[in-house]
């Protein structure tokens, strides 16, 4: 075919080739409805392939042709690495439609296999046949198989038996003795089966195996398992991909000692399944937003993103949606569950009721109040695969963490906390009525500007230790709502860095219907002046952001005169706490003794004498705590003797 070069001359749509003294006309570039082949030639001096316009003479004919297409199976052989044989099978091509139909059932749901392909190829070491060898044998022994299928199955069996006899014999031997080798560890892991692993740092769980392969890691060779667990991302349940590494080992090792092993190998398989399914049901119940008690290890992350255990006690919020939005941890995409995987149809308990005002479009749970979308219920198989950990927030540590489902507990609320407050009854009623009304009707009253001024702000002022912080804590306890205590440590004092975390915290608290306590608020709300522009900027940020806060806010200060005047107008209720008198201190001592269950050890005379000591509520608590520790040191119960001993030390305190 004519080619164009720099010496060609063109005239209209045609060109002329004048090389070698000959003149030849050819079509314009790219105008012919045809193609021309080029053949790979040897490499040039730069080790790049050359391309020829003629077929090389030393090229062999194609191995697969009309003749080979007649055979049910094609085996492709390569030089063997085993000194006992000359060749070994590189791959097997299945051409028989009868075999394809049979293998479609034998290898059903095996990942990466589609037996209806026109060209069905299996490559060594033929994992699907090793893993499904028992199924293959059982299918051959079926009654009623048509003769052609039976013959082709026998043919494939003869080919595979000769090639896989050593591997299958080794696998059977390992299973009997409960051991495996590094070379053959892949044989016990069948894709699609359930494996048992301790890959969740102290919480064993079950995963569905997808695949396994040998990989090279920084710390050495490993057989890496890719498996899926069921997780919740704040919107829906789905399949989360996990990877478990079995590091290289020498000789044989116990299957039960591997980082993961097939669940059927577990000596207490039925009991383990029962425990994991029960935990999975509890995991499903945590979907949404929940207020819980927690005690034990949780998971945080170091600077490199590696999981690190941390001990956590106290109240927590379980909330994957807020975790995804506000934590600095990436939440991986979840593959949605499908009905064909065994999920049951939604029952009456999960179907939205048209007459129910809580029905809605989104999954949302707020401490017992819920509105659910209609979704498929999870089956026991899904519960078995549920993650043992949930995402949440520790109110005490102010950290986003992973919490173990087994350690979640229901909160035992202190029903007498608010009653124990040493305040006038009318003042207590006022505080509680405002808080309860705000929680129940948070959007009933609005500003001229929509969304503005919907919150309720209460300022509690007075000297230290008179019950300001305790008031906010008691209100939250009475309402069974979370209490978020915000301080300068959470936000910092740089105006440029305060607004974003403050906005995030207020949005989180509003969703959780929590009570917000801004302790020592004068740090942020101190009077503005013409001399400190940075301080003015900080106060302005708080004034603007809190204007749109829709929840309950308690402010405490012992310097009420320093609060900026612009914020005074935004306060709905301002209460001043006077210094404690003898009667107030008597009530505080009595409440503490009652909480300790030790009222009998102290007479009314003791209470009278202790009440005369000029202490605030916090100091009284500290004295009692020290007295209890002193009594425990002597292995005795708390008595007036130990309280007096601590009070004597207190009198010598500097200042």
Image (cartoon, grey):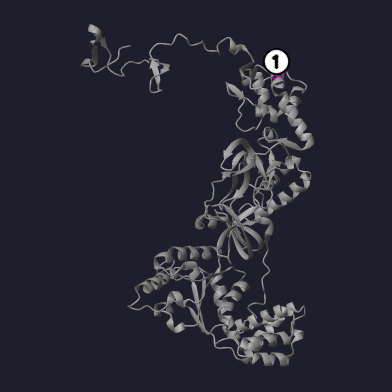
- Residue 529: image quadrant is bottom left
Task: Note whether residue 365 is visible.
Answer: no
In magenta segment, residue 249: no
As helix, strand or loop, the secondary structure at mark 1 comes to helix
Looking at the rendered image, the quarter that the C terminus falls into is bottom right
Locate residue 367, reporting x and y percent.
61, 63
Q: How many marks?
A: 1
Q: Is most of the magenta stretch helix, strand or loop?
A: helix
- Image location (x, y in percent) of residue 314: 63, 66
- Return the residue at label 1: 148
Using the image as rendered, state which of residue 542 and residue 533 is in the foreground. Answer: 533
Residue lying farthest top?
22
Q: Nearer the viewer, residue 563 or 550?
A: 563
| Residue 248 percent coordinates (x, y) | 65, 39
Quick one: 66 or 426, which is closer to the camera?
Answer: 66
Q: Residue at x 73, y 15 (%)?
A: 147
Q: Is residue 153 magenta?
A: yes
Residue 49: image location, x then y, percent: 41, 20
| Residue 529 in view of the camera | yes
Q: In which image quadrant can residue 499 be found?
A: bottom left
* Residue drawn at the location 52% of the way across and 65% of the way down: 510
Image position of 354 with respect to 479: above or below: above
**Range covered by the magenta-colored residues:** 149-156
The residue that appears at 57% across and 75% down in the rendered structure is: 472
Q: Is residue 79 above or below residue 619?
A: above
Residue 544 lies left or right of residue 599; in this view the side is: left
**Vertical placement of residue 250 versus 614, above or below:** above
């Amino acid at each position: 075919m004519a080619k164009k070069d720099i010496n060609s001359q063109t005239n209209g749509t045609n060109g002329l080739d004048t090389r070698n003294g000959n003149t030849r006309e050819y079509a314009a570039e790219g105008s012919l409805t045809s193609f021309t082949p080029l053949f790979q030639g040897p490499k040039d001096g730069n080790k790049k392939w050359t391309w020829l316009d003629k077929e090389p003479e030393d090229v062999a004919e194609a191995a697969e042709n009309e003749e080979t297409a007649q055979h049910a199976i094609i085996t492709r052989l390569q030089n063997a690495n085993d000194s006992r044989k000359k060749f070994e099978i590189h791959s097997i091509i299945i051409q028989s439609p009868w075999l394809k139909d049979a293998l479609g059932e034998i290898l059903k749901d095996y990942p990466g296999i589609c037996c209806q392909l026109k060209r069905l190829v299996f490559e060594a070491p033929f994992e699907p046949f090793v893993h499904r060898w028992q199924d293959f044998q059982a299918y051959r022994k079926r009654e009623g198989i048509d003769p052609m299928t039976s013959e082709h199955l026998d043919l494939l069996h003869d080919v595979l038996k000769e090639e896989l006899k050593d591997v299958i014999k080794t696998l059977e031997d390992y299973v009997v003795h409960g051991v495996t080798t590094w070379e053959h560890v892949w044989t016990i892991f069948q894709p699609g089966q359930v494996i048992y692993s301790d890959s969740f740092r102290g919480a064993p769980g079950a995963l569905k195996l997808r695949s396994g392969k040998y990989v090279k890691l920084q710390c050495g060779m490993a057989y890496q398992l890719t498996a899926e667990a069921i997780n919740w991302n704040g919107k829906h349940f789905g399949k989360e991909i996990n990877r478990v590494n079995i590091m290289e080992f020498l000789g044989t090792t116990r299957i039960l000692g591997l980082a993961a092993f097939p669940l059927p190998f577990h000596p207490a398989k039925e009991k383990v399944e029962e425990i994991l399914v029960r935990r999975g049901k509890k995991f499903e119940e945590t979907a949404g937003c929940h207020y819980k008690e927690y005690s034990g290890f949780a998971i945080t992350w170091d600077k490199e993103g590696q999981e690190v255990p941390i001990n956590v006690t106290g109240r927590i919020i379980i909330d994957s949606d807020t975790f995804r939005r506000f934590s600095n941890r990436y939440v991986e995409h979840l593959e949605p569950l499908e009905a064909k995987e065994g999920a049951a149809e939604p029952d009456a308990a999960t179907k939205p009721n048209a007459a129910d005002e809580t029905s809605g479009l989104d999954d949302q749970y707020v401490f017992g109040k819920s509105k659910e979308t209609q979704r498929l219920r999870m089956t026991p198989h899904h519960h078995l695969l549920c993650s043992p950990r949930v995402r949440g927030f520790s109110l005490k540590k102010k950290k986003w963490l992973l919490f173990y489902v087994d350690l979640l507990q229901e909160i035992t609320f202190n029903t007498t906390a608010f009653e124990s407050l040493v305040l006038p009854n009318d003042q207590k009623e006022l505080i509680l009525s405002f808080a309860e009304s705000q929680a129940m009707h948070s959007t009933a009253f609005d500003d001229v500007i929509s969304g503005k001024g919907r919150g309720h702000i209460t300022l509690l002022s007075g000297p230290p230790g008179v019950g300001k912080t305790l008031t906010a804590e008691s209100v939250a306890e009475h309402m069974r709502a979370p209490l978020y205590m915000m301080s300068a440590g959470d936000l910092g004092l740089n105006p440029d860095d305060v607004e974003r975390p403050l906005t995030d915290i207020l949005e989180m608290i509003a969703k959780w219907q929590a009570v917000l306590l801004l302790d020592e608020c004068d740090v942020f709300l101190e009077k503005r002046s013409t001399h400190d522009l940075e301080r003015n900027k900080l106060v302005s940020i708080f004034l603007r952001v809190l204007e749109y806060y829709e929840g309950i806010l308690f402010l405490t200060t012992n310097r009420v005169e320093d609060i900026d005047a612009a914020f005074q107008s935004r306060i709905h209720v301002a209460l001043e706490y006077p210094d404690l008198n003898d009667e107030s201190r008597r009530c505080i001592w009595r409440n503490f003794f009652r909480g300790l269950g030790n009222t009998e050890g102290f007479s009314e005379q003791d209470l009278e004498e202790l009440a005369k000591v000029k202490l605030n509520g916090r100091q009284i608590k500290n004295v009692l705590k020290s007295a209890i520790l002193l009594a425990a040191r002597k292995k005795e119960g708390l008595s007036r003797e130990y309280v007096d001993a601590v009070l004597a030390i207190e009198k010598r305190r500097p200042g």
